[in-house]
Amino acid sequence: MPLSYLEGIILYCFQQLKCERSKAAVFHLLKGKKSSQTIQDSIIFHLSNLFGICRELELEEYNHLLNRLVQLSYVKQVKGEFYMVTMNGERVLQEFLSEKPFPDKLDGATYNDIGKIFWQRLSLFVQTVSHLVYNHSKFLPITNNGQLLHFVKTYILQMKETKKNIGNRTFLEMNRLLECLDEKGAILVVNRLSGFKKNGITFEQLAAAANEDPFYLKLMFQAAVIQMVNELQKRSDQYPILFGLLRDLIKKHPLTASAEKTYRLLAEGLGIDEIAAVRKLKRNTIEDHIVEIALNMHDFAFEPYVSKEDVVKIGQAIEKLQTNKLKTVKEYLQDQYSYFQIRLAMAAIRRWQ
């Protein structure tokens, strides 16, 4: 029985986790839970591209899909909430990924942090400009989100150009931007856009017309949006209008809000216990933030917490044991290192790779 694309992704996640994380870890990953543990798992187990790709996934549906994989003998429950992929599941997964590999530029975290809002702005902007060019100032906008409506209205008024000029420049920039996409990605983007006498097509409608999995089309679309975001950042001078829809969304550091506060205090020279006292948080929470910072900041200094020699030693243990289980590594190294130090070492190893 063929897998849905979401089922294939769930199967892939369990294969990557190698029975070292529970089924809840996969659910949190796909939902994009912004906890240090989930973020670290996504990086350590090479699942960053899938982080948050299915935020609308409900626990009941997830359990149903997982149970179906069990019934098909593609995964089996080994203990408690832990599952492993069977040999049959590995064979099916290999065929699945060979037929429909993940889109190249898929990046769930970036899409949800930047791409989603950028697309909402872009689609409303294109719809608005399209109607203004045809002198139709009264139309039903594709969203009733007050912030989006205010942003686009303010942005257009700030241009202080004729409607015709705005329309022509937008058309030229959009054409140039679509050229950075492959044909399927460009067609998806164009079909999703609304304009004068044109309504955007839903993923379900597109999937039915192409006999395709709607979730697969959603991921292709997300990847296309990320490509557009990357193109705008690289060549912002070539897209003065469209880059304006993105500029304020670009963050220097992809940190959670709480980790960002800890980062600023670290930069001021405060230690872990001092930060915990200032922020009235547990030491473990601050350590979680530091691991998150280490995973995202290329200039992060590990040495105050774990030496290069210790990172090498911990890395050798991980390689020998073929596991990322903190407890297993800690016990093998005879408790020489704290869980915090081992997690930081893992972050350092990922950076060096």
Image: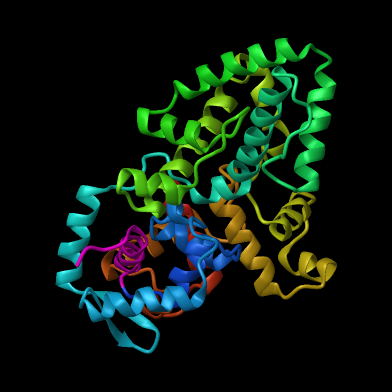
Please identify the quarter of the rendering in which residue 71 is found.
bottom left
153 or 83: nearer the viewer: 153
Q: Position of residue 167 (x, y in %)?
A: 67, 16
* Residue 22 seen from this side: no
Identify which residue is drawn at 30% across, 70% down.
18
The quadrant of the image that shows the N terminus is bottom left
Residue 125 placement, left or right of 226: right
Residue 11 within the segment the image draws in magenta: yes
Looking at the image, the residue that sits furthest to the bottom is 80
Residue 65 within the segment the image draws in magenta: no
317 or 94: nearer the viewer: 94
322 or 230: nearer the viewer: 230
105 or 276: nearer the viewer: 105
Question: In the figure, 270 relative to 251: above or below?
Answer: below
Q: Position of residue 290 (x, y in %)?
A: 63, 60
Identify which residue is drawn at 81% across, 31% down.
153
Number of marks drawn: 0
Identify which residue is drawn at 36% across, 73% down.
65
* Residue 211 seen from this side: yes
Identify which residue is drawn at 84% across, 22% down.
158
- The image's colour scheme reads rainbow
Q: Which residues are magenta?
A: 1-18
Q: Position of residue 122 (x, y in %)?
A: 64, 33
Q: Which SS does the magenta portion mostly show? A: helix
Question: In the figure, 131 relative to 302: above or below?
Answer: above
Q: Position of residue 159 (x, y in %)?
A: 80, 18
